[in-house]
Image (cartoon, helix red, strand yellow):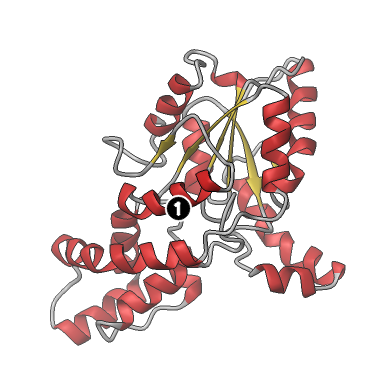
Amino acid sequence: MTSIRGVVFDWAGTIVDFGSLAPMGAFVRLFANHRIHITIAQARVPMGLPKLAHIEALGAMPEIAAQWQQVKGRSFSAQDAAMLLDEFVPMSAASALECSDFIPGFLDTYAWLQQQAIGVATTTGYTRFIMTPLIAKATAAGFAPARTICCDDVAQSRPSPLGMQECMASLGLVGQSDRVVKVDDTATGLQEGINAGCWTVGVAASGNALGWSWEQWVNASEDERDHALVDARRTLREAGAHEVIDSVADLRSAFAAIEARIAAGEAP
């Protein structure tokens, strides 16, 4: 019998969209529409936050703030962030659906979790509007989590634990956070799990921390992969991940390591 009774997955970069590419392109296009140049690297920095907070964080970056001041003749404001969010949502929804294929190995991992009677729920930094078609597509492919909490479903999204608490309630694991694992590719998403008192597993290769497409990953040599993953793994460790794996295809090994830590008397 496993001590772990529930797992809560993130979506983009964790179970779908290898490389977490969908939000990046949308953010770059969003600011470009206003004659503001941002890089993919800049767009990735606040990943995991709800999208309004993400836009606010981008607007606060000195390089981006300076461009906004020059182009618009005023400082970037909360009103500007809200306006950009209205533009971003339909762009992001289209991009997210285009990049919604499951990460290789996820469905096998999901089947294994079901065999082990481990409950599954999800949280996401996407809004309910963006997630609705993704959830429908995932359901048609056989993925049916007990609950999906979107960033606008709770009063406070990541890194607040409210979404995790809703998931644990749906899994019947209230008060048993030490038996729940949060799997995520971003620091903010991992902190959501930590703040809920759960074990956390970071995914380094498939997500925002690395930012490679599936094609880049499969075409890279083992040495290239190992070199590129050094910083990604460090980022996730520094964010508090108890274990770090390449992708959800490797989740069993992380569970085994956590089970060993539990047996040794450790708690998250």
The N terminus lies in quadrant: top right
Residue 116, located in which quarter of the rendered image?
Answer: top right
| Camera-nearest residue between 23 and 79 | 23
| Camera-nearest residue between 48 and 232 | 48
Which residue is at the far right? 222
Q: Residue at x 20, y 80 (%)?
A: 69
Q: Is residue 23 among what the camera can see?
A: no
Q: Tell me: residue 71, above or below residue 4.
A: below
The C terminus lies in quadrant: top right
Q: Tell me: residue 95, above or below residue 191.
A: below
Secondary structure of residue under mark 1 = helix
Residue 70: x and y in percent read 21, 86
Q: Alpha-carbon neighbours of circle 1 within 10 Å: few (<14), some, or many (≥20)?
A: many
Residue 250: x and y in percent read 76, 45
Residue 217: x and y in percent read 73, 68
Asked if residue 93 lies left or right of residue 104, the reply is left
| Camera-nearest residue between 249 and 110 | 110
Q: Number of callouts in the render?
A: 1
Q: Residue at x 37, y 62 (%)?
A: 93
Q: Could you tell me the amino acid type at mark 1?
A: Leu
Residue 251: x and y in percent read 73, 40
Q: Tell me: residue 39, above or below residue 120.
A: below
Residue at image mark 1: 134
Q: Tell me: residue 42, above or below residue 230.
A: below
Q: Is residue 37 among what the camera can see?
A: yes
Q: Residue at x 67, y 21 (%)?
A: 117
Q: Residue at x 78, y 31 (%)?
A: 257
